[in-house]
Image (cartoon, rainbow, N blue to C red):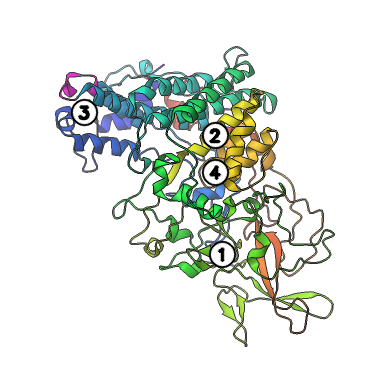
Amino acid sequence: MKKIYCIICMAALLAAGGCKDFLDRESENLLTDDQVFSDENMINAVLANYYGRIDWGQRIDDHDSYMATDEAANSGSGGWTWGGSPYEDGIFRVYDYTLIRHINQFLESIRSEATAGLSEDYRKQLEGEVRFIRAWTYFNMGRCMGGMPLVGDEVFEYSGGTDITALQFPRSTEAELYDYVISECTEIADMLPTGYTKNAARANKWAALTLKARAAIYAASIAKYGNSVTPDVRTSDYTAAEGGAVGIPASKANGYHQTALAAAEEIITNGRYRLYNEVADKGVNFYEAVCNKASAEIEVIWAKDHIVPGNNTGFTNANGPLSMAQDADANRETAILNLVEAFEYTNDRNGTLKTRTSDASDYIYYDNPEDLFAGKDARLYGSVIYSGADWNGTPIIYQAGQMKWSGSSWTIVTSSGQVGTVDEDGDMVVSIDGPNQSDGATHNNTGFNIRKFMDYKPTAFTRGAGSDMWFVRMRYAEVLLIAAEAAMELNDNRAVGFINQVRDRAGIQPLSAVTLADIEQERRVEFAYENHRWWDLKRWRRAHVVWPETGTPTLTDDVTTHNQSAAADVNTSVKYALFPYRIKSSGHAQDGKWVFDKVNASGWTYSGRRQNFQLRHYYNFLDNGWLEKNPKLVRNPYQ
């Protein structure tokens, strides 16, 4: 089962000359075991190399990746820019047996005489860390492609004349891959430290248990909903007893749910984390819970850290409001109305913004733009910048134009393709922060900006300095929501208590019962921009329902008309924007007030721009090169 990896990684093996010395340095020098393991700084450099290679899926180091979900749209550079339909068959695909080989070489070394000078405890910690990285790698491969070959600890060598058929391995079943990740996390948990690491950058015991809980809840969802919702999404090797490279038998669902709940409960009961609740303002508190590195000792369990200078991120510079820009960049990705309306009101679970009267015959008029968002779940403030909300103390005002009364109807005065414009009286026509529907390189097309993972420091808005903002991979809120989901699926009444802890921190009403829809809703708003939405909808087999291939949006894409139906059937696979207008109509009762139109985001109009998630997107296609080199690989569904 292990020999395929040498075939797949042939180029990497040849580049390394078949040598067992385990790390290609950036300088392209090879280091011997004696050189590495005689110096703790060198050991840490090797680990840093491994940690630096495991950044997959949506992340702030690849901000265009946020276009894949209903959390953001490509704004400043004008609409959808990814190829495909719109999803490519390899989107977010992970296939890194080169890293697994390097890890196995490291394991071989620390179990040998080369590390005899290290203490037993330190050797165990090193083994635990690299095995965690390996488990994380397999987990990411599995949620992309299903079961993949499991090579264990073996290090394969290749030289001229080697029988390559001995290096070809079949895929594991999907269940076997998740079982492997769960087993590894169970074994390494007690090898890892229980304390904090600087900025949560290195894995500890609680990170291992969180990965265990996450892998188990993913496997449980696939076993349950893969069979009940998408029974045809399987590989040709599927059997009712064992499943296949894609497909987990439904009979395994309860066992995985029990494993997920037990792992989460161990963290809840014995771990040292809790929900961050240090600031009285719940919106500010939520931003800090995710974006303030002080939360590493309270809530954040594991994160990808950045350091300035040398290892910065340009997420703030690329995606901030234009009014805050310090350089030539802004608004690359912006938040969308779809996400904003997912946040509940404190007294109403329906988060739809109240822009029209109940019969849609007239606008609802607001004294201030931020009044539209009053009473919303506090996590909205911590995740999204909306009109009237502040950015580090400075209000951000979005204005798409002025609204004037013609005597019988409202008409819009705007500035085509321009932002930051004023009229003859010096009154704002279009804010520098938009929105508009132009393709201006730094223009906002949605009426919102992302706040989560944005850095308040002015230098973060420059290309040169960038930001040291981290990217959170695991935090305590996820542990609670995994526990809630698993308990709900097992008919355990503790589910309500787990989910209500998260809701209470957000300042919204508690639930008296929990359904999968509640779990989906809670995870969507709690973990926006944290690389969960794509994978959640896939594991629940909800992606093709939420982002359907067909359907026509009913909201107008023409911002000069206002005939939105009271019963508008918003297509959830289309991205929407919110255009605020200030009324300038002297003598009119509503003069000076604000109204809002919901429109299609630029680039997401009737021309067919939509998420368009199809059944074939539940699993990435295997690359044709892999299949040619290894005939034992089973093709994925629809491939």
Q: Position of residue 314 (x, y in %)?
A: 40, 56
Dots 3, 4 in contact, CB < 8 A: no
Closer to the chain start, of discs 2 and 1, is: 1
Which callout, 3 or 4, points to the residue nearer the camera?
A: 4
Side of 469 where 447 appears, left or right: right
Element under disc 1: loop
Q: What residue type is labelled 2?
A: Leu
Closer to the chain start, of discs 2 and 4, is: 2
Element under disc 4: loop
Q: Where is residue 238 in the image (x, y as percent from the top left)?
A: 59, 17
Which residues are the magenta region? 110-118
Circle 2 residue: 480
Which callout, 2 or 1, points to the residue nearer the camera?
A: 2
Which callout, 3 or 2, points to the residue nearer the camera?
A: 2
Residue 585 in the magenta stretch? The answer is no
Circle 1 crowding by C-alpha within 10 Å: few under 14, some 14–19, many from 20: many
Which of the 4 image quadrants contains residue 407? Answer: bottom right
Circle 1 residue: 444
Which of the 4 image quadrants contains residue 231? Answer: top right
Side of 346 where 454 appears, left or right: left
Circle 4 residue: 527
- Is 506 situated above or below 482? below
Q: Which mark is residue 21?
A: 3
Q: Quadrant of the C terminus?
A: top right
Q: Position of residue 535 (x, y in %)?
A: 56, 36
Q: Which of 631 and 241 is in front in this view?
A: 241
Element under disc 2: helix
Which callout, 1 or 3, points to the residue nearer the camera?
A: 1
Q: Residue at x 33, y 29 (%)?
A: 193
Q: What residue type is labelled 3?
A: Asp
> What separation in Å lies between label 3 and label 2 (alpha carbons)?
42 Å
Side of 429 where 591 appears, left or right: right
